[in-house]
Amino acid sequence: MPRFFTENATMQEIVLTGEDARHIGRSLRMKPGEPLTVCACGMDYQCEITRITEDAVFLKPLSVQPCAAEPSVQVTLFQAVPKQDKLAEIVQKTVELGVFRIVPVLTARCVARPTAADFARKQQRLQKIALSAAKQSGRGIIPEVMPLLSWQEALAAMQQQDAAVMLYEEQGGRRFGDVPLAGVKRVGLFIGSEGGISAEEAQQAEDAGIYRVWLGRRILRCQTAPTAAMAILMYLTENL
């Protein structure tokens, strides 16, 4: 069933406009009486089309329930900025797996070093990728791609989570299964770029109470590691 997102939904009437309305009427060629799903703030509204105009689609909500695809934990991915277009793939795959928010981070070993203004120009495209992935995977929210943060800003933000972990390929890390996640609702996940994370940054993270996690002896690409880590987190929190 077609799936669309809105910020405003009630059980009286829902109106979709703009690109969504044009897609429903022109591309999908839907008609009054046909069903579709509207998502708002993690809730799924099962609706019936009542009227279609040139620039709006009017819907009658029939029922509403929490989106079954939304995880019980909110995972914020703090991703060190990779080279080229790898961040687009990371956004797509982690949204499909249930990430709540994606925060790009500029660390010491990032080869790509965009300014905040440079990254802001890419942010809109990345948000569109998140929207497309959310629709495809049946999410109840559109995970937000946040503005670029410095390492120190990201470190402070990770400390605000109920628990935070970082992937670290050097010795001294624990396995994911050894991280205490019982009862945790907000998890921060930090993953480095192609060069990993510096020893100084790793020590700062550990001093801040962030768990070092080791994924074994194989070195994963920076666009593979977030997918693997998200899948493990979803499994450990019974969301996969």
Image: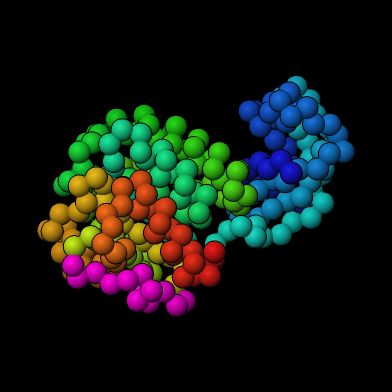
Q: Nearer the viewer, residue 109 or 40?
A: 109
Which quadrant of the rendered structure holds the N terminus? top right
Q: Is residue 221 left or right of residue 230?
A: left
Residue depicted at x 25% and y 58%: 155
Q: Residue at x 40, y 57 (%)?
A: 228
Q: Position of residue 163 (x, y in %)?
A: 36, 69
**One can see residue 105 in this view:** no
Residue 5 visible here? yes
Residue shown at the point (16%, 47%) measured from the top left: 108
User: In the rendered view of the protein, which quadrant contains the C terminus?
Assistant: bottom right
Q: With respect to residue 40, does 232 lie above or below? A: below
Residue 128 in percent (x, y) is at: 50, 35
Asked if residue 198 lies left or right of residue 123, the reply is: left
Figure check: 89 above or below 22: below
Snapshot quadrant of residue 71: bottom right
Residue 181 lies left or right of residue 62; in this view the side is: left
Q: Is 179 part of what is drawn in magenta?
A: yes
Magenta includes 70? no
Q: Nearer the viewer, residue 15 or 88?
A: 88
Q: Closer to the camera, 47 or 90?
A: 90
Residue at x-position 28% and y-position 57%: 218
Magenta region, mostly helix, strand or loop?
A: loop
Q: Which residues are magenta?
A: 171-183
